[in-house]
Amino acid sequence: MADPQHYPTFSPTEMTRRIAAVRARMEEDTIVSLVVYGAGRSHDVQYLTNWPGTRESYLVFPREGDPTLLVQLSNHLPNARRTATVDDVRWGGVDSPASVADVLRQRGLDRGRIGLVGPVPWQHHAKLAGALPDVEWVDAGRILREVRLVKSTEEIERIRVAARFTDMAMAALERELRPGLREDQLASIVESGYAREGGTHGIHFMATTPMRAPEIGVPSQIPSDRVIQRGDVLITEISADHWGYSGQIHRSYAVGEPPTEAYRRMHDAAVECYERVAGVLRDGATAADVVDAAAVVHERGYTLYDDLFHGISQLPPILRTRKTAHGPVPDFTFRADMVVVVQPNVVTEDARMGMQVGETLRITRTGVERLHAFPMRFVVCG
């Protein structure tokens, strides 16, 4: 059982609330149990157990009765038992699907509808189906996605901590970014900004390019060994985590001198897009409201490369503008206490020049609350 003295845990009231919400949805869909899969960090497993995940894990979550958490590897089991809020935490055995099937049989859950959640490998699904031929396996990922959309007060407090950690990373870059560093040295600056306070790594997508001869408009997931020069711009997408919840922020840094006029105009357009989107968000706003507000970026002569908008932890909706969308705008209505990321990645048509501006916002009854304190500005440093 979790050790609340040394590991952050939610209150019993909070865990009871979310478990009841998931089981109510299972009842509606006549699902007798969920089998939740995670490889590495798993938001769905952690949502129901407090175990963040390290390698492979399965959660057998029956509609009635106690859940069982199966953890790989065996040497990860002691830590999982200290961290998880469920009582039954076991090693996943030499064959995780066989162990899941054994637990389901022990619980009398060897027939009926069982919902799979997460990216279950096809080999695992084949083994489960072969071991339990009377089970109807269904995709139940939407149950966890929909229950997780509206955040509780305790969840929002955890996100505030993660946003504060993310701000620390941005401040560290402002202090330490300078000509002569390599791009692949920036990750150590980012992570050192929050690691001393207990924050953990989310993402640090970054790229540099000369402002007067740009070649890159989108932050890079894998850093290069390029040496940063005076007159460069650094474009960023940074996220720090706190126990299953993250902040996310996007800023640009001019290195050694002010932004060029072209970059200043682009930054103004990106901020305007962000502010217009943030300005329409409130309880009852729709996805269509968001994409209509973002059309200003095209009016200013630019386009978007990355997604414009997504729920925290990549929850729905994931939106682009009408001109850049891959399909129709989803029929989605926002509710108070949803937490989202507005992140216009404004680029020229050839995508050789660009930047990303944005951050994490909590939707309220009448508008939004910024969860970050780092200023919305084009940072000049070095």
Image (cartoon, rainbow, N blue to C red):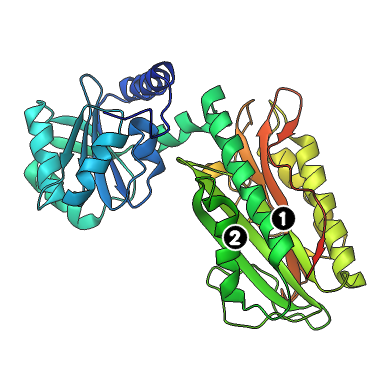
* Closer mark to the observer between disc 2 and disc 1: 2
Q: Is residue 346 visible?
A: no
The vertical placement of 208 against 48, above or below, is below
Task: Return the residue nearer the eye: 330 or 376.
Answer: 376
Residue 89: image quadrant is: top left
Q: Quadrant of residue 331?
A: top right
Residue ID for mark 1: 344
Q: Earlier in the sequence, mark 2 or mark 1?
A: 2
The amino acid type of the residue labelled 1 equals: Pro
Q: Residues within 10 Å of mark 1 (few under 14, many from 20)?
A: many
- Mark 2 highlights which residue? 190
Q: Are marks 2 and 1 in contact (CB under 8 Å)?
A: no
Give how far across and how far down residue 193 sits, in percent. 60, 55
**Residue 156: percent from left, percent from top:** 57, 30
Mark 2 residue element: helix
Left or right: 31 with respect to 178? left
- Residue type of the residue flagged with mark 2: Val
Q: Quadrant of the C terminus?
A: bottom right
Is there any visible trace of residue 223 in the rendered image? Answer: yes
Q: Residue at x 84, y 81 (%)?
A: 212
In whole angstroms, how far apart are the C-alphas of marks 2 and 1? 21 Å
Q: Residue at x 68, y 62 (%)?
A: 173
Horizontal and vertical percent position of residue 305: 67, 64
Q: Residue furthest right?
A: 261
Residue located at (11% from left, 34% from top)? 103
Above or below residue 218? Residue 321 is above
Which of the two residues, 196 or 208, is positioned nearer the viewer here? 196
Disc 1, SS: loop
> Where does the image place residue 299, in percent across and percent down from the top left?
87, 58
**From the viewer's perspective, is residue 247 above or below residue 228?**
above
Looking at the figure, which quarter contains the N terminus? top left
> Going 92% across and 71% down the picture, which residue do you hit?
261
